[in-house]
């Protein structure tokens, strides 16, 4: 599929503005619940903006359209970020923003396929998304469907053995319709990922397994656009990975400066303050 | 330091020369006198796959040991060799099911139930996807020891919502369950009998046909009612024939309520914890029926290695032991 054909991609709103809108929506949802994985959402907003407003082809009014590029959220706790992107993309109605995390909401705290339009899989048990992506990419090839499968995973998931089973399998089956995005923010539940199992270097590791590997600043939209274009247009019959180095809490300076933590603590009065800070950085 | 549980490995043993040697993985479960069918699962899968293009086969380096090689040879372009990687085997099967296919994924029961459980639970069962998990070496069907003896697989999968479980008795059950698995829209876990599989049930009940989710009376009897699944139905029928000579009338059904004052016995190739016996006991209690009740099954233990006939006798699954246990309870 060519994203150029999509009405979303043709709109004249800049990616900067899309990313800013995603951050704002995520903060508004965090404010509703008084909690949420806001650090990750702010960090990955540029990656999601590039995905949904540059790379992916989809029909907002028909989230199950057979020709859509599949976007899998392996990291279930990033749901707040993906809901923001799905609202920005018109797949989820913005009016439901205030239901985030509530009983009967379509937007539970952890992403599940049976709850939310546009949520392709149930993530959360980490290390499962890439394996499912392998099967979907195989299935698309069988159907001769030219769509891509994107799998967004975290650096912590690099510690799961199942990730590496899927890494090898994708090469074995020459899945050139599979693009894996690793959000490398170097934070997992107990501390820095680099101090756990993500000892690096990441890109050479994936390349050694036979993937086309790129490593980019995941908060640099130009670099992201270039990396996604390279990944989509590569002629080689191999799977592609983009390792995106992102900064937790990007865009809200006082949270960025806070001692980094997997679950960023935001006091009740700070949500409004964070929204004000974001407002100051609104793209012109 | 030697753990008490390890002490036996330092005791030299006298091995009786009359004992049978440990059999290979493909242990014939057929009792004397039964005809066998070769690889009924592979043949049945090819048959349904010819009618239904959605059906695919996947294995984690055990296609030859799950009779899936029959399918792979007949339809090579619909077979995926996933390598020795059970987690991606089931994740990828989930992905293929999401794209509209019906994947049959095979491995050994220990690896599906233990190693890959989270992937079967979250990627397949939670989504109610039509992935068919087909596993050889269920319960005690190999002498290799606990690494290959899936003595608790039914307990594990009984706890999993959406998952339908099939424990076939013979070649007709194996052949009959395959189209039933395709017709069922959700996930299925099937215990597989592979290699030369005996034909048992039609010999005792000529019009027997596999039915998903239905217990069937195979043999009527007044004194004892045996409710069984899998290969233990074969054992129970053979034991009933033997006990008939002793004027004990044993009824056997493959997994129905029990009224009328008979001794009720469950028989399963599985630990007595969490399998058929407990399921039957629950249903009886909920229905307010309290017959005399006994369970035949494997003990709550990691089992020994050895020859399968020796082990079946040791753990009470042989015809001799099934007949003796029932007689002892009367």
Image (cartoon, grey):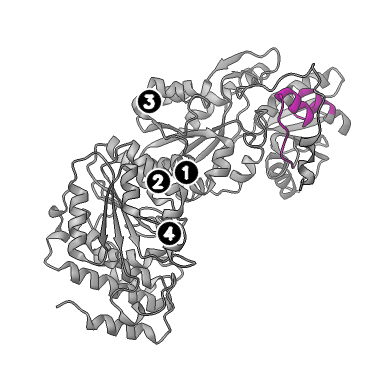
Q: Mark on residue A33?
A: none
Foreground: disc 3 or disc 4: 4
- Check if mark 3 and mark 4 are on a common chain: no
Distance from disc 3 to disc 4, alpha carbons, whole Å, reads: 44 Å
Mark-to-mark CA distance, 2 and 3: 28 Å
What SS does tag 3 mark?
A: helix
Tell me which chain the residue with mark 3 is part of: B
Q: Which residue is mark 3?
A: B51
Mark 4 or mark 1: which is in front?
A: 4
Identify the secondary structure beneath mark 1. helix
Q: Report how far apart the C-alphas of labels 2 and 1 lie in the structure.
A: 8 Å
Residue beneath label 2, please? Answer: A131
Mark closest to the chain's N terminus, 2 or 4? 2
Residue B238 x/y as whole percent = 74, 21
For the residue carrying disc 3, how many other residues have a C-alpha within 10 Å: few (<14), some (14-19), or many (20+)? few
Q: Residue A29: where, in percent of width, then height?
A: 36, 74
Cα–Cα span, label 2 and label 4: 16 Å
Q: What's drawn in magenta, residue-wise?
A: B301-324
Q: Check disc 1: other Cα within 10 Å, few if <14, some if 14-19, many if 20+.
A: many
Image side of residue B313 versus residue A12, left or right: right
Question: Residue tagged by mark 1?
Answer: B87
- Tell me which chain the residue with mark 4 is part of: A
Q: Are marks 2 and 1 in contact (CB under 8 Å)?
A: yes
B106 to A55, vertically: above or below: above
Is residue B152 positioned above or below A31 on the image? above
Query: Which mark, residue A156?
Result: 4
């Amino acid at each position: 599929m060519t994203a150029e054909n999509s009405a979303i991609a043709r709109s004249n709103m800049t990616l900067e503005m899309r990313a800013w809108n995603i951050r704002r929506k995520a903060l508004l949802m965090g404010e509703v619940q008084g909690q949420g994985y806001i650090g990750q959402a702010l960090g990955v907003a540029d990656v999601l903006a590039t995905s949904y407003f540059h790379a992916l082809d989809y029909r907002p009014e028909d989230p199950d359209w057979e020709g859509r590029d599949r976007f899998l959220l392996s990291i279930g706790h990033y749901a707040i970020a993906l809901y923001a992107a799905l609202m920005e993309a018109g797949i989820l109605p913005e009016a439901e923003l205030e239901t985030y995390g509530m009983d009967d909401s379509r937007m539970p705290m952890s992403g599940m396929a049976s709850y939310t339009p546009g949520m392709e899989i149930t993530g959360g048990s980490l290390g499962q998304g890439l394996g499912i992506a392998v099967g979907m990419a195989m299935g698309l090839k069988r159907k001769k469907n030219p769509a891509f499968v994107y799998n967004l995973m975290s650096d912590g998931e690099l510690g799961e053995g199942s990730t590496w089973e899927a890494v090898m399998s994708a090469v074995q089956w020459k899945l050139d319709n599979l693009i894996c995005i690793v959000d490398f923010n170097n934070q997992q539940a107990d501390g820095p990922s680099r101090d756990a199992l993500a000892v690096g270097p990441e890109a050479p590791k994936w390349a050694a397994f036979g993937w086309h590997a790129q490593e980019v600043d995941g908060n640099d939209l130009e670099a992201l656009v270039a990396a996604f274009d390279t990944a989509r247009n590569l002629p080689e019959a191999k799977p592609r990975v983009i390792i995106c180095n992102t900064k937790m809490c990007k865009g809200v300076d006082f949270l960025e400066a806070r001692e980094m933590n997997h679950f960023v603590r935001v006091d009740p009065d700070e949500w409004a303050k964070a929204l004000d800070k974001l407002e100051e950085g609104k793209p012109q | 330091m030697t753990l008490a549980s390890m002490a036996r490995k330092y005791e030299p043993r006298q091995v009786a020369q009359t004992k049978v040697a440990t059999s290979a993985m493909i242990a014939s479960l057929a009792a004397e006198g039964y005809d066998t069918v070769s690889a009924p699962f592979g043949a049945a899968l090819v048959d349904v796959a010819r009618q239904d293009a959605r059906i695919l086969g996947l294995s984690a380096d055990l296609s030859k040991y799950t009779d899936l090689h029959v399918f792979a040879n007949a339809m090579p372009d619909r077979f995926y060799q996933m390598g020795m990687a059970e987690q991606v085997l089931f994740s990828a099967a989930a992905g293929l099911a999401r794209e509209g296919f019906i994947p049959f994924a095979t491995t050994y029961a220990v690896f599906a139930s233990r190693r890959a459980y989270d992937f079967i639970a979250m990627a397949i069962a939670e989504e109610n996807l039509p992935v068919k998990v087909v596993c050889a070496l269920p319960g005690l069907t190999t002498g290799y020891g606990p690494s290959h003896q899936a003595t608790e697989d039914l307990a594990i999968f009984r706890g999993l919502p959406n998952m339908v479980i099939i424990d076939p008795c013979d070649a007709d059950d194996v052949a009959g369950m395959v189209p039933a698995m395709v017709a069922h829209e959700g996930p299925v876990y099937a215990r597989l009998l592979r290699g030369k599989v005996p034909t048992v049930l039609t010999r005792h009940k000529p019009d027997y046909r596999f039915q998903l989710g239905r217990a069937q009376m195979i043999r009527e009897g007044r004194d004892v009612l045996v409710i069984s699944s899998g290969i233990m139905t074969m054992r129970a029928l053979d034991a009933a024939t033997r006990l008939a000579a002793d004027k004990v009338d044993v009824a056997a059904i493959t997994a129905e309520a029990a009224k009328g004052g008979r001794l009720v016995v469950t028989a399963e190739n599985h630990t007595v914890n969490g399998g058929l016996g407990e399921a039957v006991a629950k249903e009886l209690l909920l229905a307010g029926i309290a017959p005399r009740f006994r369970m035949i099954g494997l003990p709550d233990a990691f089992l020994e290695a050895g020859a399968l006939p020796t082990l079946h006798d040791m753990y009470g699954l042989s015809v001799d032991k099934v007949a003796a246990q029932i007689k002892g309870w009367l």
